[in-house]
Amino acid sequence: MIHLNPKYIPLLATAAVLIAVFGTGSFLYPNFGTPRVIVNLLGDGAFVGVAAVGESFVILSGGIDLSVGSMVAFVGILIARLLQAGFDPFLAMGVALGIGTAAGAIMGCLIYFFEMPPFLVTLAGLFCLRGLGFLIHPESIGIDHPFYAEFLPQLSILVAPKAVLPFTAICFLASVIAGTFVAGFTRFGRYVYAIGSSESSARLMGVPIGRTKITTYALAGFFSACGGVVSTFYMQSGNPASFVGLELDAIAAVVIGGTLLTGGVGYIPGTLMGILILGLIQTIITFNGTLNSWWTKIVIGALLLIFIVLQRLISRHATQPA
Amino acid sequence: MINWVSDLLFWLFFGAILYSLRHQRIFWTVGALGLLMLFNQFFTPGFFHVQLLDGHFYGSRIDVLNQGAKVMLLSLGMVLVIATGGVDLSVGAVMAISAAVSSRLLVTEHQPAGIAIAAALLISVVAGAWNGLLVAGFGIQPIIATLVLMVAGRGVAQLVTEGQIINFLDPTMVYLGNGHLFALPFTVTLVLVMLILTLFLVRRTALGLFIESVGDNYEASRYSGINAMQVKFLVYTFSGFCAGLAGLVACSNIKSADANNIGLYLELDAILAVVVGGTSLVGGRFYLVGAVVGALFIQALTTTLYARNVSSDVSPVPKALVIIAVCLFESDVFRARMAPLFRPLGRIFKPLGSRLPRKLVTALRHDSPEP
């Protein structure tokens, strides 16, 4: 029998659920198992996915970031407003990413220096960014800049007949690869896992807690802002009232992706699978046509529950002496 | 003229309350509320105007009491949950379920209001017990355990209403959120009754002590013979009940059940109210009245912003700044860092205090022993 490292069990469980959900869909509906559906899954889930990569880092470090949805909406309206004012698209994106990263860093500083609970600080961030979005412009702004209308569509790739991988999906895959690299192959990534497993042990080992924590929240802010940029590609507009509750989808994707909410255990590719599972559930319900959209929430809630209980069993198993 | 006198009476009354609380933790919460009211007294015209119409009082201050009822009810349950070191994120979704169940029974199933209300409260208690089961029984982190119901709960509520917004006109249900009792909105009485009941439960029995000890140290309380699991289970169940009541008030306010929007983000307001009320998120010591005053403070802040024509979309910004400020003052590290800044002030005020006639000082601090 193959010896299975228990740390991979949640990830394998996620993969099994992904295959099972996809298999069910393909079995039930003739056109489900086509490359086109997969490509659409990646494209439609892109902005949540990019933000969820940042959320994964925060959760790996043992914290939580509730400001994701507001950040995506804020960056969306900021870019739309800057483009309306005649800014260069790259400059606008640069400004937005800079502000997003700075906002994340400020939250990280409050959490580290004043030992405030991440839950409350990012909750304040949620309110603050949502309000600031409305201060920039109270209504939706469409983007008709030539860069968006003409240049971006050329960046999509034809992966299979009738299946075009949109640029948003490419951004999503790129950020998953970048996130996997940072989490798994850099010193910073090691530090994040160490703090998430046990902050006091990490401190005793000489891990720079403050620098790592602040960088983690700044990184989450950066990825959320990237999600906002991708959302402008996807929606071709910015709306301060949109993406309410997006942080819950991001957190759900991370948890379903096998990352332990207590921190220290999990993999970024799991988050990719989590996003795909959420998208597949949505797609199955759309294909069915008679089921209502609220079933999505119930199924996601049930999946969350299954994974949380599974994680609980595994961590209990792991802590027991062999 | 009459307004002037009534304002003066209000402030004398308020000042007396504040003075009587000067040694207690909720002094700061009540004081913050007082500062906000003082600001409105001078800078928001019409905020203190109260008139009697058809034997009912109307005015901004009455609005604060009426509109704040939902968060006050939620904060009663939330403060106990937070005292055990947990948090209940699902209260907004439970409100939606309670509203959906009651209006479905009323309108679609043609049941009497009493049955509808009882069923809604029962379902809310079951929802709370479900959270309690996950947290106490399975030992899952409270944030995550209640996240499940927060996500799925709204789906369940929509399932109950079949995605429709159900309107109702049943007089009993409408009375709950719009009726008047003793010239004040009925919700005020409801909140007061619930507050007194809860106070009685936790301060006149050992339950409050148990809750604080479980929040302080779960293992130690278990070893000293407290059924810690049961205590945790109970507080989540109670929080579910409070959320159910708040949901009934919320749908009665607008005479309809909208599963998508009832209670949206109210869990955050409730947590905020508890924190503003002086209870630490770490658990342990809790301040029940403080949480209710905290809820009033948040509602007063919201009403002030509306009265000053700040758009409801932008109003989250000041709210966020208040959260940060309150949490900063709660943080020991921040107070320790700020202490050197305030030391010069102390150097000015202390000699001034010592120059006051001794008799006056001792008269003010009647609890300090005579020299």
Image (cartoon, coloured by chain):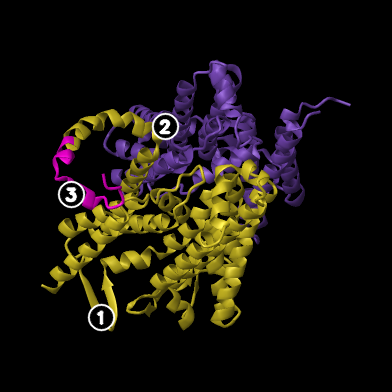
Q: Residue under mark 2: which chain is it in?
A: A
How many marks do you count on the picture? Answer: 3
Q: Helix, strand, or loop for circle 1?
A: strand
Q: Is residue B264 above or below residue A169?
A: below
Quick one: label 3 or label 1, which is nearer the N terminus?
1
Res A110 quadrant in image: top left
- In the displayed image of the protein, which residue is found farthest to the left? B1
Relative to residue B38, is residue A186 drawn left or right? right
| Residue position marked by numbered label 1 in the rendering | B53
- Mark 3 to mark 1 CA distance (whole Å): 50 Å
In the rendered image, residue A291 lying in the magenta stretch gets the answer no
Res A92 quadrant in image: top left
Identify the amino acid type marked 1: Leu
Q: Residue at 57% of width from left, 58% of height from top?
A: B206
What are the residue bounds of the magenta stretch?
A: B351-371
Relative to residue B244, is residue A149 drawn left or right? left
Of the pair B218 and B134, the residue shown nearer to us: B218
Question: What hue represents chain B?
Answer: yellow
- Percent coordinates x, y for residue A306 in the rendering: 70, 46
Q: Is residue B136 above or below residue B331?
A: below
Closer to the observer: label 2 or label 1? 1
What number is the disc on residue B359? 3
| Residue position marked by numbered label 2 in the rendering | A104
Q: Spot the purple chain and give its letter.
A: A
Q: Residue at 51% of width from left, 49% of height from top?
A: B82
Q: Are marks 2 and 3 on the same chain?
A: no
- Percent coordinates x, y for residue B317 in the rendering: 32, 46
Q: Residue at 40% of width from left, 28% of height from top?
A: A113
Are there few (<14), some (14-19), or many (20+) residues within 10 Å of tag 1?
Answer: few
Q: Helix, strand, or loop for circle 2?
A: helix
Identify the amino acid type marked 2: Gly
